[in-house]
Amino acid sequence: MSMTEFNVWLDTVFVVLYGAVLLFLAFHFFMGIVKGRARTKFIEKKWPEHDHAPTVGPKLLHATHMIMMVVLGFTGMYIRFPYFQGGRVAMRYVHYFAMIVVCIILVTRVWYAFYSKTRDWREFAVTREDLASTLGVLAYYGYFSNKKPHVAKYNVLQKMSYLLFLVMMVLMAITGFSLVTTPLLFGTSPRDWIVGWWLGSLVGSVDLAGWYARSLHYILNWAFIIMTTIHVYLSATEDIPCTLDFFGLKPLVLTGGHGHDDALSAETPVPPGDEVLPPSLVPGS
């Protein structure tokens, strides 16, 4: 199979795959209507309860990252499929700029998770309890159960997807920089530094090594598009109040719940004496 044939094959596979994902999400939302979950959330406004709100740092990084990822996806697709003339050079510069911003955000977020005063890396660690809850979480999203197991702030599928995002972003950055062929130091380019000296020797040439890096970069690009689409869908259907708060559009109302109760049982009254009081009203505070 030639390089051109392989590229056409990739394009076809991922376009069909993405179409299948959209159809599945449409079917999933339809099942939410059938099961009554959509009515409970969108009409009766019974969203999951929360006992905390995200801090400003993660929200700012998340919003900036989301914007830059959209820019990267759009410009990357234009570079692959230039559907209007004369914009390829400009799109490359915009793509490089967004790529650098995303790399800075990635490093900052990892630093924040491990070294800031409000470090939160434990919130993303997959524990044995998380793994034990996997079938229950899958049953909830598959409409086999109306109860989502509560183990931590994020469920096991969220944790796994966030960790996968991290690995993919690192690979995306490495393969992205390896596509830069402009000589920057002693007549060598980032492609020479990243893949040329080892992969070029293995496959026979630096150009062929760059082609492998480009193919992996393109596959990762589609993986990001698919995963982001699913992430946006679940954010919009599972917890709009939290989503709006994350982008600073509407403050999250704290109710004292842990955020993973079954939305269908949200109307269950709170037993007397169990109400969550603000700190100023707690006896002895």
Image: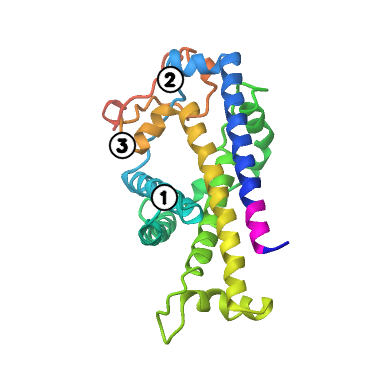
Q: Nearer the viewer, mark 2 or mark 3?
A: 3
Q: Is residue 27 magenta?
A: no
Residue marked by disc 2: 274
Q: Amino acid at mark 2?
A: Asp
Q: SS of the residue at dot 2? A: loop
- Of 12 and 68, nearer the camera is 12
- Of 255 and 101, nearer the camera is 101
Disc nearer the start of the sequence (3/1): 1
Disc nearer the start of the sequence (2/3): 3
Tell me where residue 134 appears, x and y as whole percent.
Answer: 66, 37
The image quarter containing residue 183 is bottom left
Q: The N terminus is located in which quarter?
A: bottom right
- Of 88 and 128, nearer the camera is 88
Tell me where residue 50 appears, x and y as whole percent.
Answer: 42, 29
Q: Up-down: is 169 above or below 70?
A: below
Residue marked by disc 3: 248
Q: CA distance from mark 2 to mark 3?
A: 30 Å
Q: Residue at x 64, y 23 (%)?
A: 143
Q: Residue at x 48, y 36 (%)?
A: 232
Within 10 Å of disc 2 (Cα), the crowding (few <14, some 14-19, many 20+) is: few
- Of 136 and 197, nearer the camera is 197
Q: Nearer the viewer, mark 3 or mark 1?
A: 1
* Residue 270: mark: none
Disc 2 to disc 3: CB gap under 8 Å: no
Q: Amino acid at mark 3?
A: Gly
Residue marked by disc 1: 84
Q: Nearer the viewer, mark 1 or mark 2?
A: 1
Q: Residue furthest left?
A: 280
Q: Up-down: is 204 above or below 234?
A: below
